[in-house]
Image (cartoon, grey):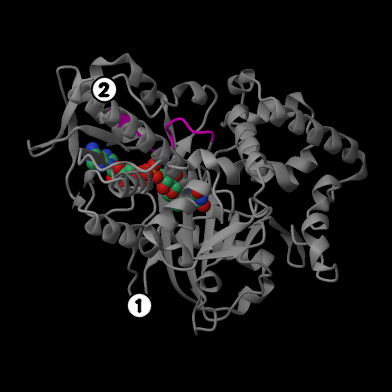
Amino acid sequence: MSFNSSHHLDRWDKSGSHVAVVGGGLAGLASAVWLAERGHRVTLVEKAGRLGGRTFSFEVTGVDGLVDNGQHLFAGCYDALLKYVETIGSAAGLRWDAPPLAIRTGPDRLLTAQGPAWLPSWSRRVLGPSWLAWPPIPLRDKPAALRTWLYLAAAVARPSDRLDEMTVDRWFRKIGVPESLRRLTLDQFVIGLLNEKPDRVSAFTFVQALRFLGGRALAGNPRAADAVWPRISLHELFVAPAERFLAEHGGEIHTGAKVVDVVVRDERTTGIELADGRVIDCDAAVLTLPPWALTSLLDRGALGGYEFFSPVRKIEASPISSVYLWLDRPLRMQRLAENLRDTTIEWVFDTSGMHGTDDAAEHCYSLAVSASWDVVHLRGTEFVSAAVASLHQHYPESRDAQVLRTKVIHQPAATFSAQPGFESQRLPQKTPIPGLFLAGDWTRTELPSTMESAADSALRAVRAVTGYLTESRARKEGP
Ligand SMILES: Cc1cc2nc3c(=O)[nH]c(=O)nc-3n(C[C@H](O)[C@H](O)[C@H](O)COP(=O)(O)OP(=O)(O)OC[C@H]3O[C@@H](n4cnc5c(N)ncnc54)[C@H](O)[C@@H]3O)c2cc1C
């Protein structure tokens, strides 16, 4: 697999500078790994007792192996994330699949991007999604649907800043998107891509995400739209190999260590302060905290005096709710992930199928709701009932299945919520404090709240740190 050249990191001649990375989610892990790869001494500091941030795994009584905090879907255009798994040596833990476009409108009706099986395979990729251009909606809505695609194409070609002043819902109404098309594809596409409802999310962020996907496809990656599923747990894919990599490259990891302040002396970053009063000295620091955690540093420490950080306070979170169901028999799914219509549950993921354990006596499915404002408050039993009812509606065979075990996971702060104005709240990786850098899915990338945005932000931060340390060293050494 080749990667976009803008993601290429130059080799660093080992200066042995010490960099502190705060936060052990994907952005922190990737920053630490790539900095260590370049020969820096890295100390990774994480508040929780484990690494992984919003991509983590845990044990469930009676279940072999680890269970993830939620389904995490990659796309073939996730260049930075794919680079990360290649660096830490876990790329074999990924399973490539056809594009994740599989909409189930009823028990016997699945619209996919694969096309009917009787088509020759070379033409299935092209003809498969052709129903998108001529969707199964009432004839009277088809001209408006065609107009919608043209509007979208024009907006993607030249995104206007003014789109960040309105929600997707308002924009769709303004350009006359037919309700039937919204119900069939577009609204769910927005929710799936941005983890936010169309009446809350910025139209600009939507267009920018489409532009990113299209751009990477046009850049020559024929698999840009393909789904990439983890065949092992997120811990085995992202965390354990990174721990090994850092150990082999002289890195140090502190978990259960909350950072409360950044030490700034002589107008440059010289350390980070932990909640127990200890200070870790460093030549540069990368903060990879989500916005809702960064605000506590603004409230108490050196950063509060800088206007630069204040937009962070406006960024809100958006929830994801999911439930794992272990059944005594498989569902008749045609794809590893199917997107349901007119039910509480939006996604059914065949977890056993992804992990290659689908011949086991138990079959595990992850049922998820993105931007789960309507269900995040439900008690476990209520949510399980709604999930089972959704299965009964779309997979009649599930009515005879026995539910062996369940695990409900409500995550109120799963992603950032890109509301109108969000683009001006996204901060760049380089801050006005020399030696202090930011990373994290919410920092300035062209992506929604995704693992790719976290990894991409890490690449940008690592490049900025490297530039800063090179300059500092040149200044110290003199002409
Ligand atoms: C259920 C769910 C499903 C998702 N599905 C997908 C998907 O299908 N595809 C996709 O691309 N993305 C998905 N995402 C989004 C993706 O997981 C996130 O965008 C990404 O993991 C964010 O990584 P991050 O490193 O920026 O932030 P985080 O993972 O939040 O990492 C920040 C870390 O900083 C630590 N921290 C906070 N404060 C301090 C402090 N004071 N001192 C030290 N450490 C601190 C936190 O404990 C945390 O470990 C999903 C997220 C969830 C929750």
Determine if the magenta segment contains residue 301: no
Q: Which residues are magenta?
A: 436-446
Q: Earlier in the sequence, mark 2 or mark 1?
A: 1
Type of amino acid under label 1? Gly
- The kind of secondary structure element at disc 2 is loop
Count of numbered circles in the view: 2
Q: Which mark is residue 241?
A: none
- Give the CA distance from mark 2 to mark 1: 51 Å
The residue drawn where x is 64% and y is 68% is 392
Q: With respect to residue 4, does 75 lie above or below?
A: below
Q: Position of residue 431 (x, y in %)?
A: 33, 23
Q: Position of residue 317 (x, y in %)?
A: 43, 36
Q: Position of residue 339 (x, y in %)?
A: 65, 56
Q: Nearer the viewer, residue 250 or 344?
A: 250
Please indicate whether residue 331 sits to the left or right of residue 417 in the image: right
Quarter of the C terminus within the rendering: top left
Type of amino acid under label 2? Pro
Q: With respect to residue 414, does 296 lie above or below?
A: above
Q: Specify the farthest residue to the left.
A: 277
Whether pointer 2 and pointer 1 mark residues with C-beta atoms closer than 8 Å, the reply is no
Q: Residues within 10 Å of mark 1 (few under 14, many from 20)?
A: few
Q: Which mark is residue 62?
A: 1
Does residue 461 appear anywhere in the picture? yes
Does residue 412 appear anywhere in the picture? no
Q: Nearer the viewer, residue 328 or 339?
A: 339
Q: Which residue is mark 2?
A: 434
